Amino acid sequence: MKKSLLRTSLLLMTLLLLVSSAAAEFDALAALRYRTSYVYAFSQGRDKGSCRMLRGDIELTVILISADGQPWTVQDLGNVNRSVDKALATLEREASDYGVALSITPVYYRTTAPADVDTQGWRENAIASIPELADVQSWTNRPVLFCLNTPGRCFARTGSESMEYVIYYVDYDPGTVRHELLHLFGAEDFYFHEEVEAAAIRHLPRSVMLNSDTNAETDPLTAYLVGWTEEPEGAAASFMADISHLTNESVETAREIDQQSGTGTFKLESGMYYGTLEMGVRNGLGLYQWESGMSYVGDWTWNTFDGRGTLTWADGSYYTGEFDDDNRTGKGTYVGPDGTVYTGDFINGRQTGRGTLTFPDGSSYTGDISDGKRNGKGTFTWSDGSSYTGEFVRDVISGMGMMTFSNGDTYIGQFKDGAMHGTGTMYYSDGTVKNGKWENGIFLGE
């Protein structure tokens, strides 16, 4: 009996040791997973670098750099001043909403230093060229905004204990200024990984770190990261829970994809691109093939279809012609999935202006087009040779016109809803003429 009890005790002790060891191993694994997670990585950016907490009195150093030696115009200077002032005012108001006192004062300087931000030492040269800044010893909580009077993609350089700064181009709005300045104080982008973006759309849809337009807002997680709150709560906590399984490596890979440069073949998040990339931005001539089956080949300007190109959809339909800021605008040809072809004017992706529609049955129309419909004056020709020249209203023959039938008969007069209706004259091929009132295609008499 004693031996049995002893064996049982030893067995229980062994089991307890195994459970304890497994629990410790589990805890260690969980800790390792957390330390390699994306959530852990961006949480560590809080109160780090030269720009710590976005609170109190802060001086923003704004340095105007002339790109390619081009002088700053009054218009460009005005754009920068307005964008910066509005961005700072919004940040101060939002901080106040969180109960945080914030006052940001912009101080402007100009430099004639070279503007090539890809050249080693450009930043130091720009600072050294400004006497008031040359002897500054510490940039702690003193963000820097380098402004170039040329188009480009804005970005922030963070994580440095010596200086954190933003490269800003003149064609961006106040939302972009705010987005990039928040980066300097620990904020994180919410669009570099598709799962991060999806979670942000669910929980933080109006975040300026998701969509940097003027009306976007500083979300609760960003408020925590820049020091306006002590804990990420509510929607911020839900967002972090949704992406807790992501590793920092996977998000960094998405970020590297977004910031690729050069000419060649690139794997992007949603497909393959063949052409030129500048900091992840498609510029010049290139081909993009989306995983969905859609493709575009042609001219690009800062990630938008701009110039001439061909856009093909997964159903086989395609457009070839002019683009403006991602929209089919100008002259072009669209071939629909059913074989219908339109060649003519486009405005913001819509068939509007003058053009020719050719249908699969052989019929065609040439004339005024409004939003893809025959509207105005034009000529429609049927496959049997019949034709109508005159007025159309929302794709329907209505108004004054001339109808020529395949047997040689011709009617000139008024139409309504596709039929002879009103006053008109029918000239029959045998020489007979009927002139008078018509109703729904029937002659009523003189």
Image (cartoon, grey):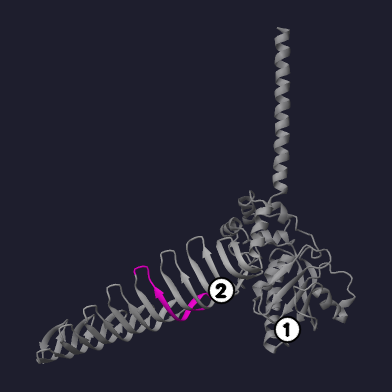
Number of numbered labels in the structure image: 2
Along the horizontal axis of the image, is 181 left or right of 441? right
Q: Secondary structure at mark 2?
A: strand
Q: Which mark is residue 304?
A: 2
- Residue 384, quarter of picture: bottom left
Q: Which residue is mark 1?
A: 68
Specify the quadrant that holds the C terminus: bottom left
Residue type beneath disc 1: Asp
> Is 26 placed above or below 230 here?
above
Q: Is residue 153 visible?
A: yes
Counting from the top left corner in percent of width and height, residue 336 is at 38, 71
Residue type beneath disc 2: Thr
> Is 438 placed above or below 117 here?
below
Q: Residues within 10 Å of mark 1 (few under 14, many from 20)?
A: few
Specify the quadrant that holds the N terminus: top right
Q: How far apart in space, not on screen, are marks 2 and 1 (Cα)?
A: 24 Å
User: Which residue is at 52% across, 63% downward?
Assistant: 290
User: Which residue is at 73% across, 78% downward?
Assistant: 147
Q: Which mark is residue 143?
A: none
Counting from the top left corner in percent of width and height, residue 143 is at 78, 70
Counting from the top left corner in percent of width and height, residue 382 is at 24, 79
Along the horizontal axis of the image, is 377 left or right of 446? right
Q: Residue furthest top?
A: 1
Q: Is residue 354 magenta?
A: no
Front residue (pair 211, 371): 371
User: Which residue is at 71% across, 25% downward?
Assistant: 16
User: Which residue is at 47% across, 62% downward?
Assistant: 293
> Is 1 placed above or below 423 here?
above
Front residue (pair 42, 202): 42
Magenta-colored span = 322-338
> For the stretch drawn in magenta, what is the main secondary structure?
strand
Q: Is residue 323 magenta?
A: yes
